[in-house]
């Protein structure tokens, strides 16, 4: 977006001229800063990150069809790739996203959504704890790249189904993760 | 007192002042139906809204009457701003009440020479303000030509010329303007308030037939066409064609104003509905921002003062004042939003919009923020972690010397609700052109949020509180409100792993755009739909 970039340069120049009553030198010295903008802008619409063909993403626990009472841990498994935090562009590294009760197609070009059904683990977590209301639920992992986009080929786990049993004692149902 | 002259009346100096006169419309009716309740609410409004607002605008109350008050300001700009803030805040208060209990002020502002006594003011300047107030619509602000000349280029509002009027017991005709805090409302006025306007114009006609002779001929032709176009079938046509100057300026102003981010709405004076602003034409899109039609109004980035907002420096985010009050925080819809609890909020200022790319770029230029901003100037800055957002407010506070910070979660919800206890500030159901979320209707781009201010502001004057970019707040994430503070402060612990985001994003569905909806995300992780809105203590 060269036009937008120019406009931004102009805006920054205008701002610095109006707001920072500095001598000429420092104002010009700021130019190198926005000059980095194209790199940042390009990084937002990169080609999809590629994953090795033999990479495997899987849910270690719970097992498919498991019946569980109360809150339970979910452990994430990844073979032939590494787990890192979001924003890290090292090749063959990514971070986990857990899809809960989601039937939506994964858009391979867009960042994985974040909401109550799409849980992000951008700090590089490899497990979490879920507290879901009683009933059948599905769990699926998707590995995302530095920008939370799916890899190519799409790296997803098998979808597992668990049944959460009603609690023995009354307790408000929780759909949120991140218990502390 | 500056500018005073004691040449003829000892102890009663004359001076030039902006006079604000206000009274409650339908006071007798309100008192008749619920005397104690009305009085209690009246007193509370005076204490919580009117007195602090006047003070904030460097004015002082000269006297109060049963149903109104008279205030004096050094600056006509501050007086009009004060009037708008009062009307907007009252509108927000009214939203939670049935229409028959609404307390609505009529306000007139005049600039004139007055005689100042210790406890009263006299003179034609005061009388004109009182007459303007009498003419004003409930919830509306009328100003004289003198005030208009002083503020027209400084306060970006819609001004609807009502022509010159001969006022009772005033020698010379007075030019009258109606202030429309939302420029887009100029069109709304002619479309939706037509029956009221017709009635008002008819009464004005009777009041001041003399005013006809001083109509502005150059305005009439365009105005007549505009008026005729907008007029719904079946309403009175006689006043429109007979006196086009009353609606003068509207059609031309509308073209210029509709494409701008809306200023906060005025409550509709005569309809029984909630004050839902209706923006009748599409907002500026990515391609036509700064198009030819906005020439009459300076673009927001360049103006230090737009609307009733305040900007602490050029390039600082535009702020709106949020009045003190209490509200019921949370909802029954999601476990994270329970329990619903009462929170007291002290007055504070909050960004009218999420922080924009242009605003963020200043922090980048100062080498205080990471260079993440992409998009155009008026896009909300995004792909921020909580730490990035925090970095920006720290820089803003340091560079301005003012207590900028992230809003607390409670402050955010209070400001987003703007007096409403419903799911959205306008009601229980998603409505077209109100929110920027998935499945919430056009305008919508699945790849990016709308530019800030593309949709209607809420009664407090905040834009973009429903969708767009989700906004980081100061609070650590807690899965429920069990144990949450009730004083409006942020609920934090050191080094919490996750922080709270409010408002939902354009990628979420309508349920996330609710006022009570909460989201959370890792503190140090960036996500493309996450931005921020700044707050500042007053």
Image (cartoon, coloured by chain):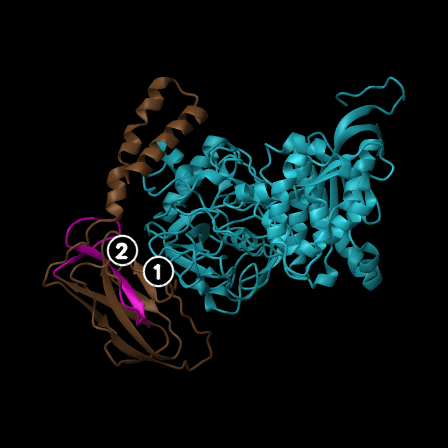
Chain colours: A brown, B cyan
Task: Please rate how many residues cluster around mark 1, counting C-alpha atoms within 10 Å: few if below 14, some from 14 to 19, many from 20.
Answer: many
Mark 1 in CB contact with mark 2 (< 8 angstroms): yes
Q: Is residue B295 left or right of residue B80?
A: left
Inter-mark Cα distance, 1 to 2: 10 Å
Residue range highlighted in magenta: A80-106
> For residue A49: magenta?
no
Q: Residue at x 54, y 56 (%)?
A: B485
- Image position of B290 with respect to B500: above or below: above
Question: Mark 1 sits on what residue?
Answer: A114
- Image position of A64 with respect to B436: above or below: below
The image quarter in which residue B6 lies: top right
Residue A148, labelled with which disc? 2
- Image position of A43 with respect to A130: above or below: above
Q: Chain of mark 2?
A: A
> For residue A94: magenta?
yes
Q: Are marks 1 and 2 in one subunit?
A: yes
Q: Main secondary structure of the magenta part?
A: loop
Q: Is residue B250 left or right of residue B167?
A: left
């Amino acid at each position: 977006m060269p036009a937008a970039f120019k406009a931004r340069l102009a805006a920054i120049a205008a701002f610095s001229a109006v707001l920072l009553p500095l001598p000429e030198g420092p104002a010009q010295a700021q130019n190198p800063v926005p000059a980095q903008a194209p790199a940042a802008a390009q990084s937002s619409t990169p080609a999809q990150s590629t994953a090795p063909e033999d990479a495997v993403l899987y849910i270690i626990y719970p097992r498919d069809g498991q019946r569980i009472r109360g809150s339970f841990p979910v452990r994430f498994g990844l073979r032939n790739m590494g787990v890192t935090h979001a924003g890290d562009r090292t090749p063959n590294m990514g971070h986990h996203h857990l899809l809960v009760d989601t039937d939506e197609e994964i858009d391979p070009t867009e960042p994985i959504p974040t909401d109550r059904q799409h849980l992000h683990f951008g700090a590089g977590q490899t497990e979490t704890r879920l507290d879901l209301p009683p009933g059948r639920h599905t769990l699926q992992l998707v590995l995302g790249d530095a920008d939370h986009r799916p890899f190519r080929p799409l790296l997803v786990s098998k979808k597992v189904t668990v049944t959460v049993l009603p609690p023995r004692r009354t307790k408000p149902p929780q759909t949120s993760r991140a218990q502390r | 007192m500056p500018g005073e002259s004691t040449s003829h009346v000892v102890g009663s100096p004359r001076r030039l002042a902006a006079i604000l006169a206000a009274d409650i419309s339908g006071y007798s009716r309100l008192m008749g139906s619920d005397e104690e309740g009305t009085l209690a609410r009246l007193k509370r409004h005076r204490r919580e809204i009117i007195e602090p607002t006047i003070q904030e605008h460097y004015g002082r109350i000269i006297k109060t009457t049963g149903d109104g008050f008279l205030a004096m300001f050094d600056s006509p700009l501050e007086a009009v701003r004060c009037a708008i803030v009062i009307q907007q805040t009252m509108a927000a208060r009214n939203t939670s009440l049935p229409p028959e209990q609404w307390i609505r002020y009529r306000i007139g502002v005049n600039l004139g020479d007055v005689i100042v006594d210790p406890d009263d003011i006299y003179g034609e300047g005061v009388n004109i303000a009182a007459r303007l107030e009498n003419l004003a619509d409930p919830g509306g602000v009328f100003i004289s030509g003198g005030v208009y000349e002083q503020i027209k280029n400084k306060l970006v509002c819609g001004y609807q010329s009502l022509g010159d009027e001969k006022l009772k017991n005033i020698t010379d005709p007075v030019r009258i303007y109606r202030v429309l805090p939302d420029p887009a409302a100029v069109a709304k006025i002619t479309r939706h308030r037509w029956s009221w306007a017709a009635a008002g114009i008819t009464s004005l006609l009777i009041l001041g037939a003399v005013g006809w002779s001083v109509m502005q001929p150059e305005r009439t032709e365009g105005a007549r066409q505009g008026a005729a176009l907008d007029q719904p079938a079946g309403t009175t046509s006689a006043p429109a064609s007979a006196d086009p100057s009353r609606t003068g300026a509207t059609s031309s102003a509308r073209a210029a104003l509709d494409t701008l981010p809306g200023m906060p709405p005025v409550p509709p004076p005569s309809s029984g509905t909630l004050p839902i602003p209706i923006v009748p034409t599409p907002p500026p899109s990515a391609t036509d921002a700064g198009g030819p039609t906005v020439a009459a109004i300076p673009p927001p980035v360049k103006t230090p003062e737009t609307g009733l907002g305040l900007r602490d420096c050029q390039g600082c985010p535009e702020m709106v004042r949020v009045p003190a009050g209490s509200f019921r925080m949370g909802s029954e819809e999601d476990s994270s939003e329970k329990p619903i609890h009462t929170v007291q909020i002290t007055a504070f200022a909050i960004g009218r919009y999420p922080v924009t790319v242009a605003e963020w770029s200043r922090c980048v230029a100062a080498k205080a923020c990471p260079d993440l901003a992409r998009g155009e100037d008026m896009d909300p800055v995004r792909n921020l972690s909580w730490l990035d957002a925090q970095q920006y407010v720290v820089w803003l506070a340091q560079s301005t010397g003012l207590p900028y910070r992230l809003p607390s979660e409670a402050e955010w919800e209070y400001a987003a609700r703007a007096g409403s206890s419903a799911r959205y500030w306008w009601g229980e159901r998603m409505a077209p052109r109100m929110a920027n979320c998935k499945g919430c209707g056009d305008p919508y781009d699945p790849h990016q949020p709308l530019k800030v201010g593309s949709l209607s502001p809420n009664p407090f004057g905040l834009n973009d509180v429903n969708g767009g970019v989700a906004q980081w707040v100061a609070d650590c994430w807690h899965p429920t409100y069990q144990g949450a503070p009730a004083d409006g402060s942020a609920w934090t612990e050191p080094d919490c792993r996750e922080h709270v985001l409010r408002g939902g994003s354009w990628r979420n569905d309508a349920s996330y755009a609710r006022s009570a909806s909460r989201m959370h995300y890792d503190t140090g992780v960036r996500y493309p739909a996450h931005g921020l809105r700044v707050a500042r203590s007053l």
